[in-house]
Amino acid sequence: MKIDFANLQYQHELYNNEIEEAILNVARNCNFIMGSEVQELEKSLEDFTGAKYAISCSSGTDALILAMMALDIKPGDEIITTPFTFIATAETIALLGATPVFVDIDEKTYNIDTSKIEEKITPKTKAIIPVSLYGQPADMEAIQTIADNHNLKIIIDGAQSFGSTFNGKTDSNLGDISTTSFFPAKPLGCYGDGGAVFTNDEKLATKMKQLRVHGQNERYYHKYIGIGGRLDTIQAAVLNVKLKYYKKDLSLRQEVAVKYTKSLEKKNDIVLPYVDDKATSAWAQYSVRVKNRDSLQTKLKEVGIPTAVHYPMPLHLQECFEYLGYKKGDFPISEVVSNEIMSLPMNPYISNEDISYISKELI
Ligand SMILES: *Cc1c(COP(=O)(O)O)cnc(C)c1O
């Protein structure tokens, strides 16, 4: 038995004719930069998410940079976010000279604990960046209320959650700006790096389009300091094929999650994922909590079951953020969860036999 964690190979085999043809088409037309496939993708992303504007870009990290630049985030600004996320969320804040201000997570969803946000707001606070961790949006109702009351912007880091919803809206269609990533292992992955930003605000959309091409409003005339942040046409071509089947992928992921939960819920000493009634998850990961995580990972590896840890060290304890002055004990829930969390193989194509095998070997 040898189980594949994300099974990208099988995904390619499923649609290989269409995807390879789409890539070849770009090669033959040589429209490598901003070919028609890019506009086609952006239109489809708008239709899929309900967001008025979808702007593709070079990665989920660059999507965060574009979003913050569009909102004029500057040195000295403070941005509230979670310490239990991938580094890019807080790294991009720091890269723009702003200060990440961390708030601990909710014990059940592992997303930012909205009851602890307000005590961190100062006159310097400009925005909140909730992360839709493992595919599930944070409590966007509570976050929107806080943002409205304190005149703050919201950027959703939806790198793991494309297609998820909160109160019936996709998380690309919430907040002021929402971002996503098309990194291959994300729920909707391309064949390299890619990402997108979403907004319903025309001014922000125009600005992000300009920022994406070195801030230019006209060729070789530059209104803003921007970045080179376009999505390659080849990646757009791959995504145009994969997006057609994505609704099905999402429902298969949901089925896999339900099957995992059914076969694991009777086990002791294992905490299963929790999805809020108001939310749906894109199930980027199916992550459980176990006490003996490290030894269990080794045992599972020996029997052909790959696992991963998202993430082993919360951001307030990372060396690169030492200058922020946080210490161990500042965010106890993030710290406990990072010691116990373990992601099981997750992709739309895991068989029932694999799920039973994994569940049987687990503890
Ligand atoms: C993957 C990820 C990113 C970065 O996306 P890239 O496309 O790899 O740059 C940002 N935030 C979160 C939460 C992620 O999981």
Image (spheres, rainbow, N blue to C red):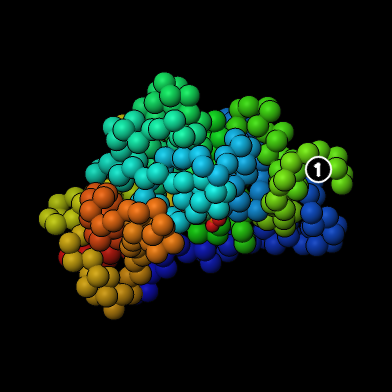
Q: Quadrant of residue 114?
A: top left
Q: Is residue 346 above or below residue 255?
A: below
Residue on which the image places disc 1 = 222
Answer few, some or many: residues within 10 Å of disc 1's Cα (few below 14, many 20 plus, some between 14 and 19): some
Q: Residue at x 35, y 36 (%)?
A: 120
Q: Is residue 19 above or below residue 1?
A: above
Identified by mark 1, the residue type is His
Q: Is residue 103 above or below residue 142?
A: below
Q: Residue at x 55, y 53 (%)?
A: 95
Q: Residue at x 41, y 21 (%)?
A: 149
Residue 192 lies, in percent from the top left, at 62, 62
Relative to 100, is 120 on the left or the right? left
The C terminus sits in image quarter? bottom left
Q: Residue furthest left?
A: 268
Residue 184 lies, in percent from the top left, at 55, 59
Q: Residue furthest bottom?
A: 302
Q: Quadrant of residue 178?
A: top right
Total residue callouts:
1
Q: Residue at x 35, y 54 (%)?
A: 325
The N terminus sits in image quarter? bottom left
Residue 265 lies, in percent from the top left, at 19, 50
Relative to 17, is 335 on the left or the right? left
